[in-house]
Amino acid sequence: MLNVQFLARYREVLNCESEQLAWQENWQSIDDVRQFLIARGEPWTVLSDPRMMCARNQDVCSLQESLQAGDELAFFPMVTGG
Amino acid sequence: MSIRVQTAPFDPGVELNAVHAGDLGVGAVVTFTGYVRDINQDQAITELFLEHYPGMTEKALLKIRDEAMQRWPLIDAHILHRVGALHLAEPIVFVATSSMHREAAFAACEFIMDYLKTRAPFWKKEQTRAGSHWVDGRDSDTDAAARWHNSEKENR
């Protein structure tokens, strides 16, 4: 399984805070999971946002980061704290 | 304090005094306090909401603090950030760095804010009379943080 979190604007657009995805053997990077979600069509295309950020196990990383079953992924817009 | 994330308002003066209290080796404390403005991009703001990613927020702030402590000869560094509903003029964020001399405290405080604004999982939602909207990330913040990546490379 993969625990995927959606935050801020993405959570609202998707009307989804988190989702457990069944692990797929062909997933190698976070981008593979992102493409899987985008392929669902609207409103998941929000994840095509070129300014999207992501995290693996609560650490900011790139879309090319490798992943494994049991990870927690998070997709979120550019951060705006401070 | 070191790292604190809270919904309750705070008094920056009280926080500043706590940073200095009891440490006779501190010669300089630099602080930054960010407040809720009443206007942003020509729109009147009535309230601000701060969302965060609870599992990651403190971890990300601690990582930024640790990096500052490694880069400069600091005595201590503190980050306090609020989440939830914030009213106009209330403080949002407080960063304090202490050192023997001012140079390290000045640079580290700016570094922490630049990294916080580009790496810590907080999102602002502004409330106006016309409704609410998420604040967009700014390229100028990304550029400000990039200065420190470059200086890191130069120091290697």
Image (spheres, coloured by chain):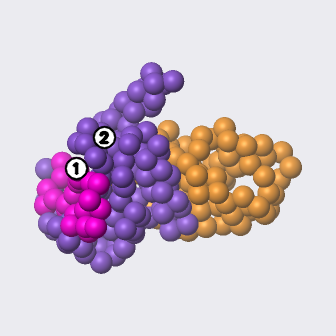
Chain colours: A orange, B purple
Q: Residue at x 41, y 27 (%)?
A: B151
Q: Which mark is residue B28?
A: 1
| Mark closest to the chain's N terminus, 2 or 1 | 1
Q: Position of residue A47 (x, y in %)?
A: 55, 48
- Disc 1 is placed on an element classified as strand
- Disc 2 is placed on an element classified as helix
Q: Chain of mark 2?
A: B
Q: Quadrant of the N terminus of chain A?
A: bottom right
Left or right, A42 with respect to A35, comes to left
Which of B98 and B110 lies nearest the eye of the viewer? B98
- Which amino acid type is shown beneath numbered disc 1? Ala
Magenta-colored stretch includes residue B31: yes
Magenta-colored stretch includes residue A43: no
Q: Chain of mark 1?
A: B
- Which amino acid type is shown beneath numbered disc 2? Ala
Write down the region rendered in magenta.
Answer: B15-41
Q: Look at the image and tell me whether residue A72 can be seen.
A: yes
Disc 1 packing (10 Å; few <14; some 14–19; many ≥20):
some
Q: Position of residue B10 (x, y in %)?
A: 24, 73
Q: Residue at x 59, y 62 (%)?
A: A5
Q: Position of residue A35 (x, y in %)?
A: 67, 45
